[in-house]
Every structure is written in C-alpha cells, then in structure tokens.
Image (spheres, rainbow, N blue to C red):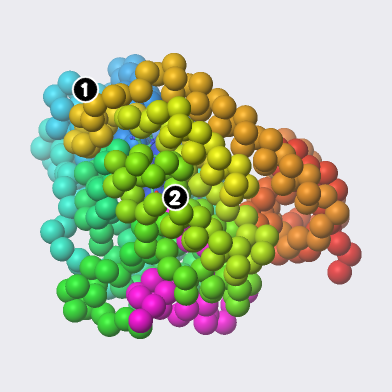
C-alpha cells in the first residue's frame, strides 16, 4: 500500500526516492514515520520499490510467519537490485534487531541493518554506507532513559514525507514508551525492543500539540504496556507522580488540552491497568468508548505459565470496571491458542471467556515458538493441527458475536470521526465511531475526511457499518 505524499510547498524536490514497507504493529508504523521524517531533506517518497533508490523494510518478528514474509520479500528485492544497481536496501525493525547479524552474513542484498533502538542513526548509516561501500549494522538499545528534548524529534517536520504511505493526517500515533519489561514467556518483544523507556510528559505534549496544529483529530498513544508508562522516569528520579501513577497523570494532562480531538491509547497489559484509569472514560468523552485489553488465555494455569501476572478472575474484574465506567464499552483483546501445555479444558476456558466478555473483535493467533523465549523450551508443545482447529473455533465464535453486536448498532446515533475516502466507491468515506467500529457513509455533497459528525447506522456486516449523516 503506497501513495504519493509529496508536499506541494516543497519547491526544490530532493532527487532521490525512498519507499518504505511496514510490517506488524502500530509501533512500527510510528517508527516508519520517524525514519521518513529524518530522510525528508534528501528523499521524496516513492510509490513503489521499483521506482526507489532506497527501500526500507520495517519488519516484525512477533511470529515466525512475519519473519518468513520479510525473507521472501528480500528475495524479490534482490532481483530488483540486479537490474537497478544503485538500489539500497535497509532492513529495520524487530527482525533487524533479532536476526540482523545472521542476515548480513547470509543475505548479501542487504545494505543496512538498523534495529528499533537505533532508527535515529539511519541518516549516518546511509552516509557511512556511501563512504565505505560496506554493509552497516546498528542494533541494540540505549542503556537507560534518555528522554528526548530535541525539538527535531518532538515537532513535526515541514514536509509531509514523514506521513507513512496510506496514512492520513487525521489519526496519528505518538510513541510514549519503547520496549517492555514484562518478559511474558512467549514474547520476543523485550528481546527485540529492549527495556521500557518512557518519553517525558513535556515531550509527549509537544508532539501531540504539533500534530493537532497540523490537522490531527485523533491521537493514539503507543507503548507495549502504556499502563506502566513512566515507571523508569520515576525510578530514576526524573519525575514525580500522583498516587494514580505517571500514565494517569499523562492522560489527565492531555485531557486538559483545549482542542476537539479523540485520545486513545494502546497496548495495556491488564496487570498494570488500574481502577482510577478505567473511570477516566466515564468523565471524558475524548477517550471514546473502546478499550483493547489483551488477555491471551482464559485458563489460570496457562496465564501463569505465560507470566501474565493476572488470573482470569482479576482480568474479568478489570472488564467490569470498564463497563462500570461506560455501560456499553466496546472491548477487544489478543488471544494465543495452543500455548505449550494448553489442554482441551484450558482452551474451553478461553472459549468461555470470549463468550462471556462479548468482545467487539479479537486478534487471535496460533502460538509461535520464538528464539530467546522460555516457552519455546517448554514441554508439551501443541500440534499445529490442534492449534488450527482451536483458532478456527474461536474465530467462528467471535464472528458470530461481532455480527450480533454490529447488528445491534442499526438504528443508533453515533459520532464518527471520518478518516479517509474510499478508494473504490465514489463519494464514500470511512470513519470510526466512539466504540471504534468502522463506518461507511456516502456523501456526494461534502467531503467528510477529518470531520467528526453524528450519523444514523442503517446497515451492518461483520466488518463494517453503513450509516447516513444526521442533518445538523
Ligand atoms: N504488549 C501487549 C502485546 C504485544 S505483542 C500485551 O501486553 O499484551 C502483540 C500480540 O502478539 C500479543 O498480545 C500476543 O497475542 C501476540 N503474540 C506475541 N508473541 C506471540 C507468539 N510467540 N505466538 C503467537 N502470538 C504472539
Ligand atoms: Fe510482550 Fe508481554 Fe511485553 S506480550 S510486549 S512481553 S507485556
């Protein structure tokens, strides 16, 4: 998915072209934007690898499939490089961090490997590559909190090159924390993204304000575990916090900004999700009526083996806090099926939980053994065909719940933030409700992108609601 986003104000367009392909989570999307921002003086954004002098693959390592995708894409880029010798290939992201050294040895088409902790070195790496004509490798992480105070990083650059292809200025990501200190036994993230490092509150503010000034209507705060935001800053004596903790303080300060916008945040490890935080939704429309709370499993002993640090009943209590705050709170989750040792009974507990919570949607995955993680070495690995059956059963259950919940929307009035026009249907626009449901509206009279408007829901399918604008 690539679109041209050249800034018309940019009179002297740089000669070289860059394209970026982003895999995986929103964090990678945010990193891609930062890399493009750093390159905007020298490169224009290209629509495809074929038309580029520089291709960046920003990769994901969370499951094995994601890794294979990158290797197969590199195979295609190798053929391209044979025709276009000046093409430079950068592998960034979590695969770069975890497999970078090995890849440089076995995949000679790669020019630069840059891990998520080193993306700000990309420009220097390109220069060094040019000068020394040798592959460059930059992986690893800063040892301790080095909060940014550099305005370059907290303010938007003057061109739109930083906007990730396919993204628009309406909904933007702001990374408030990198890394993760949780070490869930299945997860490679602490190994590929390092320790938790939080961005100081004033720097988050600068970035948010700068995005709002440039037309953003929705801000997504990003971290692997946003609820533990600031724990490192507290530890190092860089900040003080109220009794509700630094993330609560950050949110309440952002809620005071005098501007009409939506504020969302993801992802939350339920372990650190607190009651006061859940009650913020009740008082602040800006936070919407949707929350993503990854559970992973409904079985007590699997959660323990995963080191999730919550029991199923503690998790359910947190769900009840959210629904005490907002009665019809839409909730989504992540689930792993086939974790080592998962019995039929364990899976049934997960199935029952999905039925009980009535999630608006779920991301369900088969367990994928990852290097460096303890679970890879656990006994009783589950057969792939059992994983596949369980995944299918769960997805079928969730599909029926999603359809039922979406049908209940028909006849409701909802407030929609319109995000982008349809690429297929004339005059159609897509947006999201307070509950984060995707809505399509046909509007021949006025463009809707960037507007927040009330609509009446008239039709529902599993993936999309259809609506009409309410005359205001
Ligand atoms: N920080 C988030 C998770 C980030 S990783 C949290 O606390 O839950 C995103 C999702 O990928 C996880 O929630 C999990 O469901 C999935 N995932 C991570 N490692 C996995 C693995 N080894 N196999 C399958 N799914 C995995
Ligand atoms: Fe992964 Fe657990 Fe952190 S799922 S990102 S180690 S909270």
Which residue occupies 32% across, 53% down?
309
- 428 vs 234, left or right, is right
Mark identifier at residue 107: 1
Residue drawn at (52%, 77%), measured in percent from left and top? 255
Q: Does the magenta stretch include residue 245?
A: yes
What span is colored magenta in the figure?
Answer: 243-269
Q: Residue at left 51%, top 28%?
A: 391
Q: In this view, does 356 lie above or below 84?
A: below
Residue neighbourhood size for the residue with mark 1, other residues' Cα within 10 Å, grouped as few (<14), some (14–19), many (≥20): some
Is 190 situated left or right of 435 in this image?
left
Nearer-the-camera pick, 157 or 197: 197
Residues at discs 1 and 2 in contact (Cβ within 8 Å): no
| Closer to us: 93 or 323 | 323
User: Which residue is under mark 2?
Assistant: 312
Residue 423 in the image: state x and y as whole percent: 68, 39
- Between disc 1 and disc 2, the foreground one is 2
The answer to which quarter of the image holds residue 261 is: bottom right
């Amino acid at each position: 998915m690539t679109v041209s986003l050249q800034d018309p104000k940019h009179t002297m367009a740089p000669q070289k072209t860059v394209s970026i392909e982003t895999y995986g989570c929103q964090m990678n999307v945010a990193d891609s934007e930062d890399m493009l921002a750093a390159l905007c003086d020298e490169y224009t954004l290209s629509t495809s690898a074929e038309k580029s002098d520089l291709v960046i693959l920003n990769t994901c390592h969370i499951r094995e499939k994601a890794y294979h995708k990158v290797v197969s894409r590199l195979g295609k880029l190798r053929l391209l490089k044979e025709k276009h010798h000046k093409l430079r290939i950068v592998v960034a992201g979590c695969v770069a961090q975890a497999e970078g050294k090995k890849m440089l040895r076995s995949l000679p088409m790669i020019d630069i490997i840059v891990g998520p902790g080193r993306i700000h070195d990309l420009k220097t790496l390109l220069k060094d590559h040019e000068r020394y004509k040798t592959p460059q490798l930059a992986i690893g992480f800063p040892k301790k909190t080095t909060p940014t105070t550099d305005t370059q990083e907290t303010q938007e650059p003057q061109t739109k090159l930083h906007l990730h292809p396919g993204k628009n200025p309406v909904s933007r990501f702001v990374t408030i924390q990198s890394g993760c200190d949780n070490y869930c036994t299945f997860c490679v993230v602490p190994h590929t993204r390092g320790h938790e490092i939080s961005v100081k509150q004033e720097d988050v503010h600068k970035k948010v304000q700068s995005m709002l000034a440039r037309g953003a209507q929705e801000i997504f705060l990003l971290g692997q575990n946003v609820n533990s935001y600031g724990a490192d800053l507290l530890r190092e004596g860089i900040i003080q916090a109220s009794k509700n903790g630094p993330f609560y303080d950050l949110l309440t300060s952002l809620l005071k900004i005098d501007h009409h916008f939506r504020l969302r945040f993801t992802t939350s490890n339920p372990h650190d999700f607190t009651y006061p935080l859940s009650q913020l939704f009740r008082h602040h429309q800006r936070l919407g009526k949707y929350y993503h709370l990854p559970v992973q499993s409904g079985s007590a002993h699997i959660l323990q083996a995963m080191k999730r640090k919550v029991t199923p009943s503690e998790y359910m209590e947190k769900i009840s806090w959210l629904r005490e705050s907002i009665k019809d709170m839409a909730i989504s989750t992540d689930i792993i099926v086939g974790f080592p040792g998962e019995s039929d009974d364990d899976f049934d507990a997960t199935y029952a939980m999905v039925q009980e919570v009535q999630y608006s949607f779920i991301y369900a995955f088969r367990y994928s053994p990852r290097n460096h993680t303890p679970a890879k070495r656990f006994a009783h690995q589950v057969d792939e065909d059992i994983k596949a059956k369980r995944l299918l059963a769960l997805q079928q259950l969730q599909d029926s719940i999603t359809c039922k919940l979406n049908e209940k929307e028909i006849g409701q009035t909802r407030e929609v933030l319109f995000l982008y026009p349809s690429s297929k249907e004339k005059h159609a626009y897509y947006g999201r409700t307070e509950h984060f449901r995707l809505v399509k509206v046909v509007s021949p009279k006025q463009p809707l992108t960037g507007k927040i408007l009330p609509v009446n829901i008239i039709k529902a399918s599993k993936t999309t609601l259809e609506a009409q604008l309410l005359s205001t």
